[in-house]
């Protein structure tokens, strides 16, 4: 669901991925970029949000492995 949210509002999906400071910085840059470029920069922010969402999922999986796995052995 977070990937779909990234298509519409990338700063909110970055916030939900657990990066609040980055979400604020992206929001401050994203709003003027949308207003002045007519949306031409929006795909760049979508890509950034997708990368951050993927990275946070990988970090979560790595923490689970370090804690002892999923218990399916």
Image (cartoon, rainbow, N blue to C red):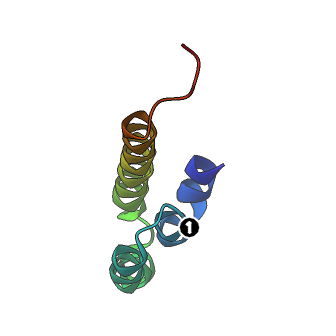
Numbered disc total: 1
Residue at the image point whose x is 61% and y is 57% from the top: 5
Residue 13 location, x and y as percent?
Answer: 53, 63
Q: Is residue 19 above or below residue 35?
A: above
Name the outermost residue toward the right: 1
Q: Nearer the viewer, residue 32 or 9?
A: 9
The quarter holding residue 29 reads: bottom left
Q: Which residue is mark 1?
A: 9
Q: Is residue 65 above or below residue 48?
A: above
Q: Is residue 62 above or below residue 42?
A: above
Residue at the image point whose x is 60% and y is 53% from the top: 2
Q: Nearer the viewer, residue 10 or 33?
A: 10
Q: Nearer the viewer, residue 36 or 45?
A: 45
Helix, strand or loop under label 1: loop
Residue at the image point whose x is 36% and y is 80% from the top: 21
Q: Nearer the viewer, residue 3 or 20?
A: 20
Residue 10 location, x and y as percent?
Answer: 49, 65
Q: Is residue 8 above or below residue 61?
A: below
Residue at the image point whose x is 49% and y is 60% from the top: 17
The quarter holding residue 33 reads: bottom left
**Could you classify mark 1 by the number of other residues whose Cα lies within 10 Å: few (under 14), some (14-19), or many (20 or more)?**
some
Residue 18 location, x and y as percent?
Answer: 46, 66
Name the outermost residue toward the top: 73
Residue 46 location, x and y as percent?
Answer: 43, 55
Q: Quadrant of the C terminus?
A: top right
């Amino acid at each position: 669901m977070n990937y779909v949210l990234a298509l519409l509002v990338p700063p909110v999906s970055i916030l939900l991925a657990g990066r609040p400071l980055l979400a604020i910085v992206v929001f401050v840059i994203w709003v003027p970029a949308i207003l002045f470029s007519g949306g031409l920069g929006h795909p760049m922010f979508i890509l950034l949000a997708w990368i951050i969402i993927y990275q946070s999922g990988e970090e979560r999986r790595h923490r689970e492995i370090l804690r002892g796995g999923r218990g399916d052995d």
